[in-house]
Amino acid sequence: MTVEKKAGARKPAPLRKPRAAKVAAPKKPTWDISDIDTWGPDRHELGATIIEAGNSVYNETGGWRSEVPEIDREKCDGCMLCYFYCPDASIIIEDGKAVGIDLEHCKGCGICAKECPTDAIVMKNDEKE
Amino acid sequence: MATIDTEILAVTGNEAAAEAMGQIDPDVVCAYPITPQTEVVQLYAQMVADGKVSSEFVTVESEHSAMSAVIGSAAGGARTMTATSSQGYALMWEVLYVAASYRLPIVMTTVNRALSGPINIHCDHSDTMGGRDAGWIQLYGENHQEAYDNCIQAVRIGEHVDVRLPVTHMYDGYVISGAIGPLQMLTKEQVQAFIGPYHATNPMLDTKHPVTVGPFDGLHGWYFEHKVSQNRAMDRALTVIQDVADEYAEISGRHYGLLDPYRLDDAEIAIVVVGSTAGTTRMAVDKLRAQGVKAGMVRVRVFRPFPHEAYAKALEHIKVVGVMDRADSFGAQGGPVFLEVRAALYDSEPRPQILPFIYGLGGRDIFPDNIEQAFAVLQKAAQSKKRTSTERRYLNLRAD
């Protein structure tokens, strides 16, 4: 077994740039739970089972945020570490670069800013009216 | 209605339950042995080893794991069974609630045994009575035949689309589990035709329709609505239990109801009792009847859901009802069955007197004399103009 030498490699080498990856916001599921707040005991799935994948997009966690990531698109080299590390899949990628944040779901945890090797993402106070 | 003549076998209660499991031949059995249930698991493991059943048999390291494993299996979409007793049932406790709230129709044989301490391996009902609010349907059997019949019916009850709840059926440790008694069996083909195939709701192994089972209910979730849904299923189970029993009677010739009355129609005093002691109580009733005393009895078959309307109807004409509990509810007004029966009769006019008796804890013997003593208390209360105290009366308690 060979061990790859990593001496001096402070920052991870940029990943192979994806081919013009476009990662749009996730699709809303077809299982319509938009009025779930009004559901009575007989309308829920048996045993609280969730019968369709991906419906956590309905759970808008953006309101938990006190800081918001700000992207400097000039500094972004497209390594996409922010995209892989983001626990809420909130980094919007266009043409292989981070271009924006899904603010309905970004909790402002700051992991993207911490992981960004080119300091293209910094956390700013999320000023709300 | 056909009466079915089949060979009468001499078996232990555990053999009866294991034979029922073998004929049900569930997809998965996950179990851990505990006295006095061990024989059930051992016999079933032998059937698996001998290729007599096609079940996947999962040995686990504890009852907590056993119940967790059957939940996983049932959530996967498999027809799943297990068996336990006493401390094992207690160790399953937190997961029992999960099984019920996930609406998984698991069937469990519970052989009733006392809970520690002091450590005691003998029969009483404190194990399953303690779990009466876990959301499981509870069927209490009286004898070997019911250890078999209830097990088969439990499958149909739990899996019914109006119910979808786990079911435990019980019989008394040692008195039934280890003693030899008569059993008439159906054929495996009859049992298979009766239970039919199982169609799980939203099974996890249906990979074309991925689901999440057991999610966090959220910070402002629907826990309350789900609990109400569970209780509605319990209410509907009463009808289903009777329908399944009626259908079972057609193939077996054996009739079961929500409760089991004996010489009750013209009775003035009556005893309500659970499990194997019903046999002894019938003897006492017959003896008193021969002496001209209008005594009767109700045996509890279905305890969860509790058929309170059926109890009110069966007992409202009785002057004094004695309820014999083989488990106590410490600090309550009486044992668990007493509390239910008394509540069921609250709206009756005139309202019968209901008196609590505790007996048989930790396997203490219950003799015909003890039951006659209880009837004597009821008789005296029936003749008295004053209402009789509802303090607990203990049968066959040692006193110096």
Image (tube, coloured by chain):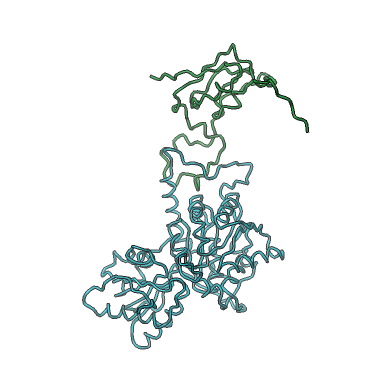
- Judge whether residue A20 can be spotted in this image: yes
Q: Nearer the viewer, residue A60 or A115?
A: A115
Quadrant housing residue A29: top right
Instruction: Identify the residue at image location x=30%, y=80%.
Output: B379
**Drawn side of residue B384 relative to residue B229, left or right:** left
Tell me: residue B281, above or below residue B201: below
Q: How many marks?
A: 0
Quadrant housing residue A9: top right
| Residue B348 percent coordinates (x, y) | 29, 67
Q: Residue furthest top?
A: A74
Quadrant housing residue A10: top right
| Residue B54 percent coordinates (x, y) | 68, 60
Instruction: Identify the residue at image location x=64%, y=57%.
Output: B58
**Drawn side of residue B145 relative to residue B382, left or right:** right
Q: Residue furthest left?
A: B385
Q: Nearer the viewer, residue A39 or B148?
A: B148
Tell me: residue B224, above or below residue A22: below
Tell me: residue B313, above or below residue A63: below
| Residue B376 percent coordinates (x, y) | 32, 81
Tell me: residue B16, above or below residue A106: below
Q: Colour of chain A?
A: green
Instruction: State which quarter of the image contains the C terminus of chain B.
Output: bottom left
Q: Colour of chain B?
A: cyan
Q: Nearer the viewer, residue B373 or B261?
A: B373
